Structure formats: structure tokens, C-alpha cells
Amino acid sequence: MDSRTNTASKQEYSVHDEVEFLSFVLGEEHYALDIMSVKEIRGYEPVTKIANAPSFIKGVLNLRGDIVPIVDLRMKFGVGSATYNEFTIVIMLNVYERIVGIVVDAVSDVIKLTTEEILPPPEFGVAFDSRYLKGLATVEDKMIILVNIQALISSDELGLIDASNHSDQE
Amino acid sequence: MSINMAEFHQVFFEESHEHLESMEQLLLALDLDSPDPEELNTIFRAAHSIKGGSGIFGFTALTSVTHVMENLLDKTRKGNFELNSSVIDLLLRTVDTLSHILNLYREEEPIDWQEVEFSKNQLVAALNGESFSTASASSGAAVVASQGDVESAVTSKTAVETPPESNTDEGFGFFKDDVELALATESDGYGFFDEAYIAKEITVDDLHPKGSESAVTKADAELSDDELGFGFFESLTPEAEDTPLVDDISQSAAEASVKANGNDDQPTATTNTTSTTRTTAPKTQTAEVEANKTDGVKVVTATTTKTDVPVKTPAAAKKAAPPSSDSTLRVETSKIDSLVNLAGELVITQSMLTLIGNELGGEVGERLKTALNELERNTREMQEAVMSVRMLPVSFVFNRFHRLVRDLSDQLGKNVNLVIEGGNTEIDKGMIEKLVDPLTHLVRNSLDHGIEKPEKRIAAGKPEMGTLSLKASQRGGSIVIAVHDDGGGLNRDRILQKARENGMAISDNLPDKQVWQLIFAAGFSTAAEVTDVSGRGVGMDVVRKNIEALGGRIDIDSVTGQGATFEIQLPLTLAIVDGMSVSTGNQIYILPLVHIIESIQPQRDQLKFLANEQLIKVREEYLPLLNLHELMEIDSHAQTPEEGIVVLLESNNKRFGLCVDGLVGQQQVVIKSLEKHYRRIPGVSGATIMGDGSVALILDVESLALHVNN
């Protein structure tokens, strides 16, 4: 049961209970997020620093006229090495009509998973707080951690959104 | 269906609002001795449009009031009703009532029927009071009656409650009945419309006084059709009597359609109605003749046409002319905003290309540079064009002050003439809305405290009538709006005294300009005793705050005994700010130019400390000194202030110095929101994109000033 599909040849529509995820690497771990929140993937560019922001908020950059914050998930979760070179990847996300960029070590693949393939997460063992986990899946003997990226981005923990105006949070 | 209606509602509200505003303006400007028929027609049409629209949507409160108002206005424009200032007052009050009702409908709140009835009764009373004296049955009035009836069929409720035309004069009943009769007989003749135009069915209903209920949901186009039916009917009659030439008839019918158009301001409807008229005219003719045979209505309606059309047609043509020369389009602001943004992006992309192009040499480089120059010109022009879409003449704000000045000077027992200059100076739409409050404040203050009572003015050797002028002009990259009055001016001693009472340390030889600025201090806002003398204390701090929020500044000029001028300087648009870019470390920040007093290279002996707080001594004044790199938590290249530059800033009357590494240059920057994708950052009001595509933060001088106290 190979549920992996190539990005280029992927099927147009997932069947009712099949969801597509974009998988990425943070340190040694493999993660994936709902591909519907991904706006685009690009390389890292110098950002404009912001005062009084936590260190994992690298700053803001200009995404075709939008001023977009960039979060380094590696720094947030203390995994991987926070180096920036031409291979550093930023995933631009669309969450609650906002655009947020996250820095990860690498982007690996687009995977399709059915609901049966997603297992409940354990309470510990990954860098992510279990609140932001959707579940776990196994793809080619690798464990993939499915992230509830909407909950993560809008969380107070990241502080990307003013507490006063994120009532639309789940 | 209901969703669609809601969309139309919004348009109706906006249009009605505009109609009410223009009505108010015209009423205020109306010359009582010889009212301009043109203006009366416009006022009438405005009322009529609101009535028509509200009828369609079932806003009966609006329909009923405008109905009576329309009757009064129609009599006025036909010269059957004498206007006097109390009638104008009444009409102005009615306009207020209408706009109140309009708002209630807009907010979907319950309608104050008491208010509606009161307003209606007042109008009816005014109408009755005058109409008996001019009861000599005029043909013009007959049309009102007949029109009134058809339209009251649209809103049957109104017709029942207020049938003023039937009890105002004897002739009315006669004419009305006959016209109705003619219509009734005629409706047979109209039957052929059904074949040619399915939509005509509605018209028949409309014209038929009995088809009341279904008529409520008719669209505008049909309304003008029903008007057309009338013009048609009237204008046809005389020709039918003499030598009915088909050409003549269709021509007069077309004329009538022009009139209908003028009444409804519905350009789209014109083509429809005109073509309808053309195709149906020949056939109607017979129907008309038949109708004429049945009774004596023809003579009456014939005269009606003759007096009616000449008055209306030129008016309609004139009214139609300006819109056709610069026709307008209603577009959502968000769409314009995204266009403005895109144009801004294009400018940035273009300057990025120019930077890259400069690195290229050789023949290709030269060619590229030529093309880039072309691109630069085009993008700039495009940006300007897109920006101008957002611009509105400042008269949108100014014109509402006619009413304010009129009401307030009456109330205060003063004689004030309002002069407006430069009303067509254009200003950003977003700014217009935010200018209303501060300007209202200034105008009120000038009226209340600035301009003296007539007796006092005469005693001072000034003309009895005071003058308040509102002036707008463009000066370089900014708009200047001046509120000037020829009153007593500000009282320097009083202001100084008040300032000292408030605990401010003020020296006696402070220059006038700085003394006047004191009235913007918060402590002066509620001070009634200053108000009594001549100070303009009421909420001036709020005025200044509002102006500063727009990126502008306000200056006062005052000459004792001769008056005062409040001059507001605003940027051309809210989206762009004049800024000074400064560098600290490897980051660039933008300081809004309005806050910058000067920049200095500090000397060692200018720098002092007070309990660990750094101070800088500038011309016998110690000012607090802030370090930008500390505020923004970045590394600075300059280790001490004297290695860098100190920018002296002022906000809310607070002055302080800001240490930066260096000045980069002055430029206009496009303001971008940070909150859209991120959150508010303390000390930062927004961001902008620089020529190289990088982001620079725009500093919020006001919130930086708060650091000074902490």
C-alpha cells in the first residue's frame, strides 16, 4: 500500500477521506502539514528584524507587497541547526487569511493519507506540543508527524497574532 | 432574491444619501426672491428619486414623507407655491428627518413613525396653508395630481393617509378624475405593449390606479416607464387633435423620455424607454385619439404638456450633460485599494529592475536602460492615475458647513457669511471622512468664540456680518486647508494665564505662534473660562490628534481684533508618507517628516546625564535622548551618540532626541500594514518596502515619545 505520490503526477482530487500533506524535516524528525494551507515554498531571504520579538521570529519580509512574518520552527523547537544558506527553505502558509512563513530544514514530499492511516499521537516524544498534533502516520517505514498548522500558527505560544484579534481561532 | 435585494438596498442608501446632501446644499443656496427653476427641479428630482427607490424596496416611511415633500416642491417649481425662509427651514428639517429614517432603515432599526407623521403633517400644513391662496386651477398641478395618484398606487398606504392634492383645490378633483378616466380607457390601447414588450405588462399595472399591490416591487426602469407613459400621453394629445403625424408623435414621445430620464437619473433606462416609445408611438396615436373623444381631458392635458415640457426638458438635458461628459462609476473601495497596492508594487519592482540594470554594461545594458527609463515613466504615471481614482474634491466636506454655519449663527445670534474657496482641490477619500470631525470643531469654535456679535463688531468698526472662510489648496506635496475668521482673534494673555494655571512653565516672551499652540494641550480642552473670553478650548487637543493621525499638522495664525486662521497641512494621500530614512546597524527605519524638527551632530559637551537618563542640550534646552538601536534591540555601529546623528523629534508637544547611526535620505514611502499578517509592534506604526525590495519599519514617533516618560 504505497500511498506516496509524486508531486508532478499527483492525482487531481483526493477521494473523500484522503488528504494531501506536505512533508518536511525538522532536525531528525519528519513532519507533514495539510497542503491546503501551503501558499508557496521559497528560499530564505534576509528579513527585517523586529524589536521585542522572541528569537524564533526572525522578522518580516516583503512577499510581493505583503509584509509577512517569518518563524524559524527549528529555533522554536530547538531542533536542527539554525543556519541560513541558499538551501534554507521557507514554507509560506495561508492561515486564517494571514500569510506566515516558516523556516524548516528541508521539504521532502507530498503524501496522501486516508483517515485510517492516521494514528493518534502519543503524549510525548516529539518537539511539537501535542496540542498541535493531528496524529502520526507511517510512510515507507518512516514515522511522519502530522501537524495541525492552523492551531500552531494561531497559538499564543508563537505570538504571531495579537491576543485581541484571534477570536477566529479553533 | 432577498440577498439580491440587500445589494440593491446598499446602492439605494448611498444614492439617497447623496440626493439628500445635494438637496440640502441646494436648499441652502436657494435665492428666495427669484428661485432658479433649474435648482428647484433638481431638488424635486432628488426627492422624487428617493421616493421612487424607497417605493421599490418598500421603505414606506421614506416614501410617505418624500411624497408630500415632492408635492410641495412640485408646486413650488411650477410657481404655485411661494417659498419663504420658514418653508426652507421646514424642508431642511424634512431632509434631516429623511436622513434619520434612511439611517434607521440602513441599521435595520424600528422606524420612528411618530417622527414620520409629524414631518408629514408639517409639510401638509405648509402645503395647505399656501395652496388655498393660489388655488386657481393650473394645468401643472393636474399633472402632480395624476402623477401623485399613480405613484401613490405604488404605495397605497400613502395615498390613503395623505391625499393633499385632492383637498387643496377644486380643479384637482376634476382633473384627477378625468386623467384617471382617460387612463382607464387608455389601458386598452396599451394592451398592444404586451405583445411588443413583455415588460410593458408592468407598466400597464403601474398606470392603472387600481393595480396597487403588485406595483411595489417594480424596478427603477419601470418607474421611468410609467413616467414615460405620462409624458407620452400628455405630449401626444395636442398633436392627435391637430394633424397627427407619426414622426411628430414619436419625437415628442422621445422628448418625454428625456424628461423621464431626467427625473430618475437612470441613464440605462433611457435607451430602453426611448426605443419603447419609438416602436409604440404610431399605434398609441389611435388609442390617444379615442381617449380624447371620450371626454374633455384633452384640452387640459394639452396645456399641461406645453407648460410642462419646456420647463423640464432643458433641465433634464442640462442635468444629463455633466454626467455624460464625466460619467462616474461606483466601485468598491477595496478594489481601488488593491489597485493602488499593485501600482505601488509595480513601482518597487521597477526600481529593483533599475538597480539591476545599472549593473549591466555594454550595448545590451544601454538598450536595457532606455527600456527601463520608459518603464519608469509609465509606472509613475500609472501610479498617479491609480492614486487619483481615490481622490475626491474637498467640497464634499466643505459643503456640509453651509448648514452648520447657518444653523449655528442663527442660534448664536450672529451674522456670518461662509466663503468657500478651492472646493475642487482633491484629497484622498479616506482622509475626507476623517477630516469632518476636526473641521467641524474648528468651524464651531470660530463661530462660537471667534466671530463677535453684530453690535460688538459694529463697535469695533467692522462690518456687521462676519466672514468665515474655508480654503483648500495644494502646496507642493501636501494639501493645505485653512479655516479663517475675521473675529477677535486669540487672547494671548488669557492663554498664557491659563497655561500657568495648568502648571506649565511658560516664559513671557514666548513667540505668538508657540502661545497659540498651547491651546492644543489637553488641559485646555474643557476649560470653560477660556471659552468665555476668546480662547478656543473645546476639544482642540482632539482636533490636533485627529490631524496628526492623518499624518498632518496644524498651525495657528492670529491677529488680535482681526481674526484667526487655523491652517491644516495634510499629505496628499493616506497611503504615502513623507519620510526620512535613517540607519541603525544594518537596518533602515523611516521617520515621518512631520515630526522631525532638525538633525544635529552632537558634541560631547551637549550630552548630559540625569539619574542615568541621557539628555541632550540644544539651544538652552535639555531634551531627553533615546537610542534607536536600544529601542529596536539591534546592534549599532555608533558606540556613542557623538559618533552618530541625533534627530530632534516632536510629538504631542513633547520634544526629544533620537540617536541613529546616520541619515540615509528623504523619500516618500508607501505605508503597508504590519497587522495584516503579523501583530502590532510597539514603537512602529507600519512598514514600507524599499527600492531593493527589503522591508523598512516606519517608526511611531508618538509611542516613542511615551518612552521618554518611562
Image (cartoon, rainbow, N blue to C red):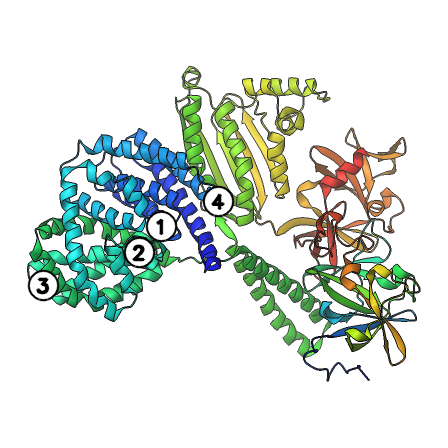
Pair 2/3: label in front = 2
Q: CA distance from mark 4 to mark 3?
A: 53 Å
Is the residue under label 3 in contact with that under label 2 (CB below 8 Å)? Answer: no
Label 2 sits on residue: B223
What number is the disc on residue B541?
Answer: none
Res B394 label: 4
Look at 69% across and 66% down and name the residue there: B352
Badge 2 vs badge 1, beta-carbon distance below 8 Å: yes
Q: Earlier in the sequence, mark 2 or mark 4?
A: 2
Amino acid found under the numbered disc labelled 3 = Pro
* Residues beneath discs 4 and 3 located on the same chain: yes
Callout 2: chain: B
Q: Is residue B561 above or below residue B565?
A: above
Indicate the chain on which mark 1 is placed: B
Residue B277 image offset from top left, x and y in percent: 23, 64
Q: Is residue B40 visible?
A: no
List the residue tagged with mark 1. Answer: B55
Residue at 56%, 38% (x, y): give it: B568
Give residue B244's mark: 3
For marks 2 and 3, the one nearer the N-term is 2
Quadrant location, the N terminus of chain B: bottom left
| Closer to the eye: label 1 or 4 | 1
Q: Which mark lies nearer to you, 3 or 1?
A: 1
Chain ID, mark 4: B
